[in-house]
Amino acid sequence: MRKLSFVGKMAACVVFSLMFGNPVLAQISLRTALDGDRDGNADYTIFPPSNSIWYRLFSSGGIGMQAFGMSDTDFMTPGDYDGDGIGDVAVWRETTGEWWVIYSSNYAIARQLWGVAGDEPVARDYDGDGRTDFAIARRANGIITWWIIKSSDQNLIVFNWGVPTDFVAPGDYDGDGRFDVAIQRPGAQPTDPATFWIIYSSNFGLDQIVFGQSADLVVPGDYDGDGMTDLAVVRETGAPNNWLRWIIRYSSTGQIVEEDWGVAATDLTVQNDYDGDGKTDIAVWRNTEGRFYVVFSTGGVGQIHWGEPNDYPVASYDTH
């Protein structure tokens, strides 16, 4: 995934809203997006640009391989688009604005035209029906506009939320089973405080939370297992070690925890639930080694050699 770099200020206004469907646990959908064997664990998944094949190391055993997508034009957009509880292989092609999905339920290939060049794919489950919705964020005319097709009824949701220099940060911050539209607003300097602006889907209330710094990466996840997305960022610590420092605010208690895990020069963030306990695990993929390093929330750490240097770890799609 190519990381889009945007910094700045915000002008926002909700322009359209609709009633949503019955909720399911939206945070579980982040795990499901990478769970190809439906065992409740995210699978280690890589995409080598050299051959455009998705390689999945199933946590239940075995290996999956699927040629799909083009490395020079496509964003990896895994999700459960057919609602069968299994992660579907999917991409968004920026040059044509096309979504391509292989449904795991019947292996049919679906095409959805949604978006144009310059948009950012933000496919999540915004209506709570257990299926990933096609969605893009468009930076134009001084604002970010979110365009979402609800999978439950194919109706359209449109939000103006953010300005072009903000980072998108969708998550289920209120725990109602539906993803919330949210952005992270950096300050003018790298060490200035950053602010999260969230529209809660449960009541359309607005929240403003100062957390992290402008140069931090946003790494959404439910790290405490309460069903709500926690505010979480990763920061480069600089010399002499240049570690990646994970800073997480638990939504259940407000406690802020920090963990140094990963090396800034070589690692990509790949947080997900690899042990199936309902909590997001801190994890990185080391490009120089083709290896995953995970801090399991159930206890202990692990490393899995899966991939080669310059491959792309698909779980990194949810870092902003």
Image: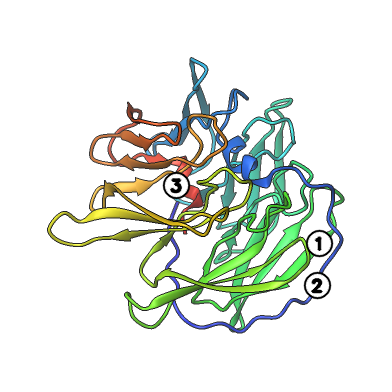
| Amino acid residing under circle 1 | Leu
Question: Any mark on residue 316, and which?
Answer: 3
Spatial CA span between label 2 and label 3: 30 Å
N-terminal of the pair, mark 3 or mark 1, is 1
Q: Quadrant of residue 12?
A: bottom right
Q: Nearer the viewer, residue 273 or 167?
A: 273
Q: Secondary structure at mark 1?
A: strand
Image coordinates of residue 65 in percent, x first then y, are: 50, 24
Q: Residues within 10 Å of mark 2 (few under 14, many from 20)?
A: few
Image coordinates of residue 166 in percent, x first then y, are: 51, 73
Question: Any mark on residue 16, and which?
Answer: 2
Which residue is farthest left?
240
Q: What residue is shown at x 57% (from left), y 30% (from top)?
A: 35
Q: Residues within 10 Å of mark 3 (few under 14, many from 20)?
A: many
Q: What residue is shown at x 63% (from left), y 40% (from top)?
A: 28
Q: Indicate whether 71 appears above or below 264.
A: above
Q: What residue is pinned by disc 1?
A: 156
